[in-house]
Amino acid sequence: MSYLPIAEHGLIGDLRSAALVGTDGTVDWFCPGRFDAPSAFAAVLDTEGGGHWAMTPTCEVASRSQFYYPDSAVLVTRFLTEHGIVECQDFMPVGDGPQRLVRRVLNVRGEVGMRTEVVPRPGYARERAAAKAVPGGVLFTGEDLTLALGSSVALTTGDADASAEFRLDAGESALFVLAVGDPSDDVPDDLAPSDVDALFDATLRFWRDWLTSSTYTGRWREMVHRSAITLKLLTHEPTGAIVAAPTMGLPEELGGERNWDYRYVWLRDAAFSLYALLRLGFTREAGAFVGWLTDRFTEPRDDESGPLRVMYTIDGDPSPAEVELEHLSGYRGSAPVLVGNGAGDQLQLDVYGEIIDSVYLYDKYGAGISHDDWRNLCGAIDWLREHWDRPDEGIWETRGGRGDHVYSRLMCWVALERMIRMARRRGLPGDLAGWTTTRDEIYHQIMDRGWDAERGAFVQRYDADTLDASVLLMPMVKFVAPTEPRFLSTLRAIEEELVVDTLVFRYDAPDGIDGDEGTFSMCSFWYVEALTRAGRLPEARVALEKMFTYANHLGLYAEEIGLTGDQLGNFPQAFTHLSLISAAINLDRALG
C-alpha cells in the first residue's frame, strides 16, 4: 500500500467514533468504541503495519471518485473499470446497540471482480488480533478488543487477517458489517439485504432529519451544511463533548515533527464549534455541551491552574501525557507519532473568553443557563480577575515559553464583557462594578501595550513586534469597531506579511518547535470575516470562493494548506469548519 494524500479521504461516524475511508476504498483509520480509543486501523500512520480494511477491484481501475449521499454522512466510493462500475457504500449507523461499520458493495454496470482484505491491528498496531472463522464471518480477538466481521461472501481466514475475492454482476451486491463487541459476541446477524437496507435508510434518515433544524438558507448552503455535518460527526453524543479532530499524528509539515494528537476536547475548539452550531440553529448540541462543561467546574483545581483546563478527554478527565509510538513510521515518514497531548498542562487564559462567549450565546438563543451554571461562571470570573495579567502559552500552544499574548488578554476582556451582558440582560447577581473595572483595565492595557505605533498594528505579544492573525477577531468579538483606524491598519499589515492570495499564516516567529507549517485555514476564514466587517465585500467574496477551492472533493478541510495546496494536519479539523460557517453566514448577511 502507498500513502494517499490526506485530502483523498472521506469521514464516516456514529457520534461515538469515526473512520477515514480513502478514495482507493481502504479504511485506514478507525478507533473502535470512541474517538480517543486505541486504533484498530491506522494505515494512514503506517501503511505496512498500521492495519487496514481494503476494498478494491481486481482489475485495473480507470478512475475513482467519492461523494456523500446528499445531506448525510453516508459515503460512496466509485470505481470505474473497463469491465464495469462498482460503488462501495460506507456508513456507521447512529443509535443504540453495538457500534458497526457497514460496507455495501454494489455493481452498477458490467461484471467486476473485487477483493477485500481486513487486517486489524489493535492497540495502535501494537497487537495482532487473532482471527477465527465462524459461521457467517470472522472473529478478531485482541487483548481488549473483539471485532466481529459478518460477510455475505466466503472469507479466507489467516492468523490475524481475513480476505476474499468475489465477482459481482450488474445489480448484485456484497455486504460486510464489522461490529465492535466483547469476546463473547458472535458475528452480526443483520447481514440480509433487507437488514442492511434498513440500516442504510435509518442512517440517511437520521442525518437528513438532523439537518432540517438548520436555519441557514444562504448562498453557500452546500458548503455550510457539509461543515455542520462534519462538526456533528466530531460530537461524542453520549457525553456532549466535541473533539478537535478524529485523528492523530497527521503532519503539519511532511517529514516534520509537528504531529499532534487532536482526539480530545479543547475548550477553545469546542466553544467555537458551539458558537457555529448555535448560529445554524442547533441548540440541542449546545445544551449537551453546556451540560458537559458544567461537570468540569465541579472538579477541584489548584489556584495556579484555574478552574478549567485547556483540554480534556471526552469523559472530562485530564488529557493523557504525550507518548511516542516508536513502532509507527508516521504518515509519509513524519515522525514522531505522538499519542496524548502535552499542551494539556499549559496555561491558556483565552479559553475563558471563548467558553463564556459561547455560553452567553446559548443563554441568549438556546434554553438558557441554570443557577448552577451561573454560579460556576461567577467562580471562574472571580479567578480570572485575579490572574488575567499573567504570561501564558497563548492560543497557538507554542512551546517556546510563556508570554503576554494580546489575544489572551483580548479573550479575558470578552469573558468579563459577556458576564456583564448576561447579568444585565437577565438580572443575574454579580459584582458588576468590579467586573466593569477589570474589563476596562484590560481594554486600556491592550490599547497601550498591544498596539505597536511603529508597526501600525496590534501585535502578538507585549514588547514584541510580531504580527499574529488571531487579532483579526477583535471586531468579531466587539472589542473594536470594524472601521477602527487601528484595526484597519492592523489588517493592512497582516495582509502584507501573513496573507498569500487569501491564505493566511498564523504568525511568523519562532515557537519552540523545529520546522515550518502551512497556512492556517481557520485564519484564512477569519480573514474573510475581517474583510466582510471592514466593508470590503467584493474582496471578501473572492477570498471565500478561493478558500472553497482548497477543500477536498467532499468539502472537507484539514488544519492547514501547504505550498502546493495539499491538506496538512489532522483531518478533518473542527477549527476550519466552524470558521467557514461563521465567515459564510456573516458575508451572506452583509451581501443581503
Image (cartoon, rainbow, N blue to C red):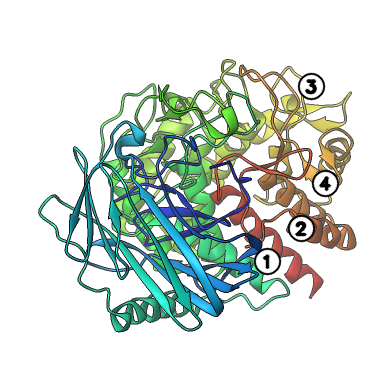
Q: Nearer the viewer, mark 3 or mark 4?
A: 3
Describe the element under mark 2 as helix, strand or loop.
loop
Q: Which residue: 83% across, 32% down?
A: 457
Instruction: Give the image quarter of residue 523.
Output: top right
Q: Nearer the viewer, mark 2 or mark 3?
A: 2
Disc 4 marks a residue whose amino acid type is Glu
Determine which of the numbered discs, if any, sits on residue 549 in the image.
2
Q: CA distance from mark 2 to mark 4?
A: 31 Å
In the image: residue 552, left or right of residue 437: right
Q: Nearer the viewer, mark 2 or mark 4?
A: 2
Disc 1 marks a residue whose amino acid type is Ile
Describe the element under mark 4 as helix, strand or loop.
loop
User: Above or below — where is 585 with respect to 377?
Assistant: below
Crowding at dot 3, Cα within 10 Å, few <14 / some 14-19 / many 20+, comes out as some
Q: Nearest the camera: 86 or 157? A: 157
Disc 4 and disc 1 in contact, CB within 8 angstroms: no
Sequence-first disc among 3 and 4: 3
In the image: residue 516, left or right of residue 328: right
In this view of the protein, can residue 368 be seen by the observer?
A: no
Q: CA distance from mark 2 to mark 3?
A: 33 Å
Task: Give the image location of residue 407, x and y in percent.
Answer: 64, 34
Determine which of the numbered discs, if any, sits on residue 465 in the image.
3
Describe the element under mark 1 as helix, strand or loop.
helix
Disc 2 and disc 3 in contact, CB within 8 angstroms: no
List the residue tagged with mark 1. Answer: 585
